[in-house]
Amino acid sequence: MNNYVFFGTPDFAATILEKLIGAGFLPAAVVCNPDRPVGRKKVLTAPPTKILAQKYNIPVLQPENIRTSDVLTLTPIFGTSDVRKFDILIVAAYAKIIPEEILQIPRLGTIGVHPSLLPRHRGASPIQSAILEGDEVTGVTLYLLDEKMDHGPIITGREFPISNLQFSTLRQKLAELGGELLIETLPKFVSGEIKPQVQNEEYATYTKKFKTEDAYVDLEKDSPAIIEKKVRALNPEPGVWTMQNGKRMKILEAEFKDGKLTLKKIQFEGKTPQFL
């Protein structure tokens, strides 16, 4: 199973791609965001998926805006609906809308890897939202992309317990699960053994992109359980914070046990983190 193109940019996507490559599923090309300036010194940095692809000599495409003129740049490489060069496109954390004319190119469709049990938690922040809403389980869904957000027919899915995991840890676990699920599922999907099922819109929920103001907590007024969920869900970005004696304080780690909240790690603005 090598006749596919992989779309994805961050660590989440790179983990999935590495699983696929390790199983012998090398993509014909990787599409990711352009290199971006990172850090205070604004060092131009390649995305994780690009670094991984170059390690295996996989061609990399980095269109700035795939929604408009870049489609014309990509179609000679991918083909068209009349000349289908690839069986499948796989999309994981690409963070850009892929035009319909690209989605229609692969012979068998475009598979999305979404870190929730669709149709629950469609949108930009499924992992954070699952933690904040107190879900006991989340998971990964493989589905066929269509013109609507996280809406297409479901190929398969698998649950994963949230427990008391932090966002970063849960994201990594779900990325690994997504890669494993693709490895198990792709041969069956290509052979026609799996028939995608339409999502039940009655159970659809939607998430939002969290901002700095969403990560504020009031240690005096907010529920300890809610604060602990925010600490697990909204670190490192946008970063949970409060005000203490007129100073902004980040809450990096906290524990909720026996009805009580204990701050475990904090950081005042301009200072180094400290354990309590």
Image: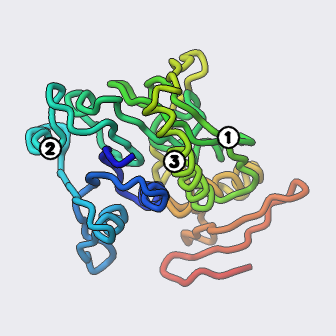
Amino acid type shown at disc 1: Glu
Amino acid type shown at disc 2: Leu
Q: Which of label 1 and label 3 is nearer to you?
A: 3
Q: Which mark is residue 63?
A: none
Kind of element beneath mark 3: helix
Q: Look at the numbered discs 2 and 1 and tell me whether their residues touch, using CB distance below 8 Å.
A: no
- Work out whether residue 109 or residue 203 is closer to the camera in this orientation and state it: 109
Identify the residue at horizontal 54%, vertical 17% (top origin).
201
Identify the residue at horizontal 71%, vertical 41% (top origin).
137
Q: Look at the numbered discs 1 and 3 and tell me whether their residues touch, using CB distance below 8 Å.
A: no
The correct choice, above or below, for 265 with respect to 106 in the image is: below
Kind of element beneath mark 1: strand
Residue 153 x/y as whole percent: 47, 23
- Work out whether residue 25 or residue 81 is closer to the camera in this orientation and state it: 25
Tell me which numbered mark, 2 or 1, is placed earlier along the sequence.
2
Tell me which numbered mark, 1 or 3, is placed earlier along the sequence.
1
**Residue occupied by mark 2:** 74
Kind of element beneath mark 2: helix
Extreme residue toward the right, this view: 258
Residue 22 x/y as whole percent: 47, 62
Please indicate whether residue 141 sits to the left or right of residue 138 in the image: left
Q: Which mark is residue 159?
A: 1
Residue 67 location, quadrant: top left
The correct choice, above or below, for 174 with respect to 193 in the image is: below
Q: Which mark is residue 183?
A: 3
Other-residue count near label 2 (Cα within 10 Å), few / some / many at <14 / 14–19 / ≥20: some
Examine the rendering and report whether any part of residue 58 can be seen.
yes
- Work out whether residue 149 or residue 208 is closer to the camera in this orientation and state it: 149
